[in-house]
Image: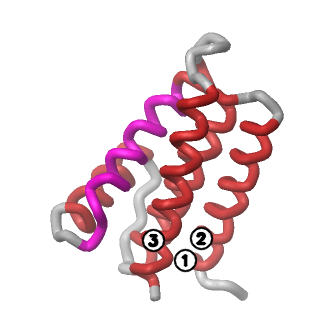
Amino acid sequence: MKSPTADLLAKAKESLEAARVLAEKGHPGFAASRAYYAMLYAAQALLVSEGHAFTKHASVIAAIGSRFVKTGRLDRRHHRAMIAAFDDRVAGDYGLAGQVTVADANEHLDGARAFISAVETLLI
């Protein structure tokens, strides 16, 4: 059986792939949502690796900020990317069509790739 950390990281990568496919198919709002979830799962993997577990999105985002960004272990740009993707996830999932642009979705995809890479580096 895999560890919870490995399972969450695998889920993050799968979500990133789904985001890429959705973006290619012309669904930027849903792509942004999946990119956010890729970051969420990677963040949860990082937190679980140190014995922390949070269920609310805001709690995970706050814990990444306090436990990894403020301590200098994770670059602030990754935290900002996660927050921006969260905002567009809400718009993509619950807002009107067109609220999230293709450019927005691509930015979140890039942010999610970088976030996952940074998390993998910290987990080594």
Contact between labelled residues 3 and 2, with CB atoms less than 8 Å apart: yes
Location of mark 3 (residue): 119
- Amino acid of disc 2: Leu
The residue carrying mark 1 is: 5
Please tell me whether residue 3 belongs to the stretch shown in magenta.
no
Q: Is residue 97 above or below residue 52?
A: above
Mark 3 residue crowding within 10 angstroms, few (<14) / some (14–19) / many (20+): many
Check the image and report above or below for 21 versus 55. Answer: above
Vertical side of 101 occupied by 18: above or below: below
The label number, if any, that marks residue 38 in the structure image: none
x and y percentages locating residue 87 in the rendered image:
44, 30
Q: In the structure shown, which secondary structural element does the residue marked by tag 3 occupy?
A: helix
Tell me what residue is drawn at x 67 percent, y 29 percent.
28
Mark-to-mark CA distance, 3 and 1? 11 Å
> Residue type at mark 1?
Thr
Residue 69, quarter of picture: bottom left
The boundaries of the magenta stretch are: 73-90
Q: What residue is shown at x 67% (from left), y 37% (from top)?
A: 31
How would you rate the neighbour count of disc 1 (Cα within 10 Å): few for under 14, some for 14-19, many for 20 or more?
many
How far apart, in angstroms, are the residues tagged by discs 1 and 2? Answer: 6 Å
Q: In this figure, which residue is indicated by the disc labeled 2?
A: 9
Q: Amino acid at mark 3?
A: Val
When asked about the image quadrant of residue 58, the answer is top left
Instruction: Mark 1 and mark 2 in contact? Answer it, CB < 8 Å.
Output: yes
Q: Main secondary structure of the magenta part?
A: helix
- Left or right: 22 in relation to 71: right
Coordinates of residue 79 in the picture (x, y in percent): 33, 52
Residue shown at 77%/28% (left/top)?
26
